[in-house]
């Protein structure tokens, strides 16, 4: 009887250990659940770009949101991405030029973070080709987040236990700049704005979506956009009288999210 009890005890320990190891392994595995957002009216779904090596997942988006709003990701704990990209101001800061660490002023106003996933270039001057590159660029800018280099930033982040756990859960790795870039970019891809009254009228065909005055304004806007020097022959407020954006002048970009 005692032999059977001992055998049972051994099997119980083995079973519990196996269960525990499975839980640890599962928790460390990156999530594979997709979380691609729905694209509203007025935006081109085919232009919404998600890199094949950075699929969107709920856990990655949540981590990116934490990083985006965390002032600890600056040299003196005073600046977060959200400092210059405030939700209440359409993810801008409403200033002629943006202020970074120690209230230093940059040379440009912060562009909106909304609809950036539809653009093939990032920053005002297009110097970043991807949202991943854009997402980490400001961290080592001495006027913005103020880290001397990415190693300094990573050393600071690795002292934060919560981030160590989150990166292990989301990516299955230690904290890396590649992971930081992918997480913040994934969060930024959820910042989408569409289905405006103008979209519902001009694309959705809802005649009641905007006023007659706005309809006349849309006619003028489309004419001037397609041919800046043209004089409108008619300003009749109908959708058929507007000139398609695809007829734009050479050099004029009509892709959503290009700045």
Image (tube, grey):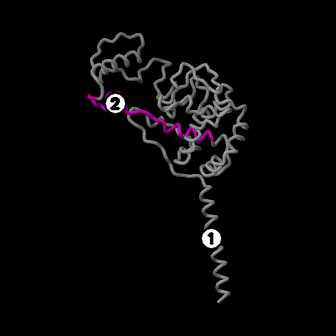
Q: Residue at x 51, y 31 (%)?
A: 86
Residue 223 image offset from top left, x and y in percent: 37, 16
The stretch drawn in magenta includes residue 206: yes
Residue furthest to the bottom in view is 1
Disc 2 secondary structure class:
loop
Q: Residue at x 59, y 59 (%)?
A: 26
Observer-nearest of 55 and 196: 196
Q: Residue at x 53, y 37 (%)?
A: 188
Comes first in the chain, label 1 or label 2: 1
- Disc number placed over residue 223 in the picture, else none: none
Q: Note whether 16 is above or below 88 in the view shown.
A: below
Observer-nearest of 135 and 152: 152
Q: Note whether 75 is above or below 18 in the view shown.
A: above
Q: Residues within 10 Å of mark 2 (few under 14, many from 20)?
A: few
- Disc number placed over residue 16 in the picture, else none: 1
Q: Residue at x 67, y 83 (%)?
A: 6
Please tell me how many numbered marks the rendered image carries: 2
Residue 74 image offset from top left, x and y in percent: 65, 33
Observer-nearest of 54 and 1: 1
The stretch drawn in magenta includes residue 232: no
Q: Which residues are magenta?
A: 180-208
Q: Is residue 129 left or right of residue 197?
A: right
Q: CA distance from mark 1 to mark 2?
A: 60 Å
Instruction: Give the quarter of the figure containing the N terminus.
Output: bottom right
Disc 1 secondary structure class:
helix
Residue 65 image offset from top left, x and y in percent: 55, 40
Q: Is residue 240 left or right of residue 66?
A: left
Q: Is residue 115 left or right of residue 160?
A: left
Residue 50 image offset from top left, x and y in percent: 53, 40
**Residue hosting label 2:** 203
For marks 1 and 2, give the one nearer the viewer: 1
């Amino acid at each position: 009887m005692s032999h059977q009890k001992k055998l049972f005890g051994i099997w119980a320990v083995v079973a519990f250990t196996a269960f525990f190891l499975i839980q640890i392994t599962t928790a460390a595995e990156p999530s594979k659940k997709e979380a691609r957002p729905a694209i509203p009216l007025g935006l081109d779904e085919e232009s919404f770009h998600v890199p094949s090596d950075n699929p969107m997942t709920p856990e990655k988006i949540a981590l990116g949101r934490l990083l985006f709003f965390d002032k600890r990701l600056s040299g003196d704990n005073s600046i977060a991405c959200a400092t210059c990209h405030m939700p209440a101001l359409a993810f801008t800061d409403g200033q002629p030029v943006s202020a970074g660490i120690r209230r230093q002023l940059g040379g440009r106003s912060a562009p909106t973070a909304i609809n950036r996933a539809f653009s093939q270039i990032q920053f005002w001057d297009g110097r970043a080709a991807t949202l991943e590159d854009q997402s980490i660029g400001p961290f080592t800018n001495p006027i913005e987040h103020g880290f001397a280099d990415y190693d300094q930033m990573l050393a600071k982040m690795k002292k934060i236990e919560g981030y160590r756990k989150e990166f292990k859960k989301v990516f299955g790795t230690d904290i890396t700049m590649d992971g930081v870039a992918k997480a913040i970019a994934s969060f930024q891809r959820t910042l989408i704005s569409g289905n405006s009254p103008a979209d519902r009228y001009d694309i959705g065909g809802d005649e009641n979506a905007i006023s007659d005055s706005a309809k006349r304004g849309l006619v003028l806007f489309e004419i001037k956009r397609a041919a800046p020097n043209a004089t409108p022959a008619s300003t009749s407020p109908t959708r058929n009288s507007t000139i398609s954006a695809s007829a734009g002048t050479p050099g004029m970009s009509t892709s959503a999210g290009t700045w």
